[in-house]
Image (tube, rainbow, N blue to C red):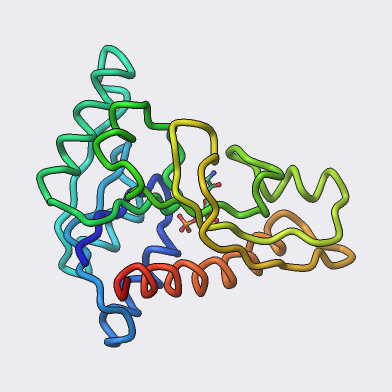
Amino acid sequence: MRIVVLVSGTGSNLQAVIDAVAAGELAVEIAAVGADRPGTFGIERSAAAGLETFEVNFKEYASRAEWDAALRDAVAVHQPDYVVSSGFMRIVSASFIEAFNGRYVNTHPALLPSFPGAHGVRDALAYGVKVTGCTVHFADAGVDTGPIIAQTPVPVLDGDTEESLHGRIKVAERELLIKVLGDLARA
Ligand code: GAR
């Protein structure tokens, strides 16, 4: 199973996938890693791992539609079975979703449909929920919407900060993403 992974930031979940593949625990080929901006650590660590990388810088395109088409083409070149959004903080439009219909997997640090968006951990903490978690789902053109594949609950502890809670969620998120990718590879 070939995947293309999309990142916007540090790519710590991606690193867990890279490590699982290297350890022979996940029968997946990471065909390439792409980003929507220059200078991400996610791209740096991918290059260090010897993976092919690409950047489709949102700011270099006159319109969202042009960026979306460029991203779609940059991903399609690698002929992935699945595209994995791992901390990719930009919404893609219908043309991208059409190209990878049912094959675009996203991870989110909350129990969707609660707390979608860029601040899922902060919003859950601010609301005062006692349990939050992570979700891996097939993404559509909405903000963290689309059919849920798997979720893991994570308790909110007294005194949690956004950072401490996100740290524990990410531990669960890495495990869940690797499990889901393994299941998809075996399907
Ligand atoms: C992850 O927790 C991911 O779920 C979240 O960004 C983090 C990226 O961490 N994504 C979203 O909030 C999407 N709405 P990483 O770059 O260290 O893997």
Does residue 49 sit above or below 115 in this rendering?
A: below
Q: Write down the quadrant of residue 67 in the picture.
A: top left
Residue shown at 25% from the left, 62% from the top: 46
Which of 155 and 57 lies nearest the eye of the viewer? 155
Q: Quadrant of the C terminus?
A: bottom left
Q: Is residue 141 left or right of residue 42?
A: right
Q: Position of residue 23 (x, y in %)?
A: 30, 87
Which of 47 and 76 lies nearest the eye of the viewer? 76
Q: Is residue 130 left or right of residue 54?
A: right
* Residue found at the very far front of the displayed protein: 187
Does residue 174 sit above or below 64 in this rendering?
A: below
Does residue 92 sit above or below 75 in this rendering?
A: above
| Total marks placed | 0
Which of 144 and 88 lies nearest the eye of the viewer? 144
Q: Position of residue 89 (x, y in %)?
A: 46, 40
Residue shown at 26% from the left, 12% from the top: 62
Q: Position of residue 107 (x, y in %)?
A: 50, 54
* Residue found at the very far top of the displayed protein: 62
Does residue 12 sit above or below 37 in this rendering?
A: below
Residue shown at 51% from the left, 74% from the top: 175
Residue shown at 38% from the left, 31% from the top: 92
Q: Is residue 144 left or right of residue 19?
A: right
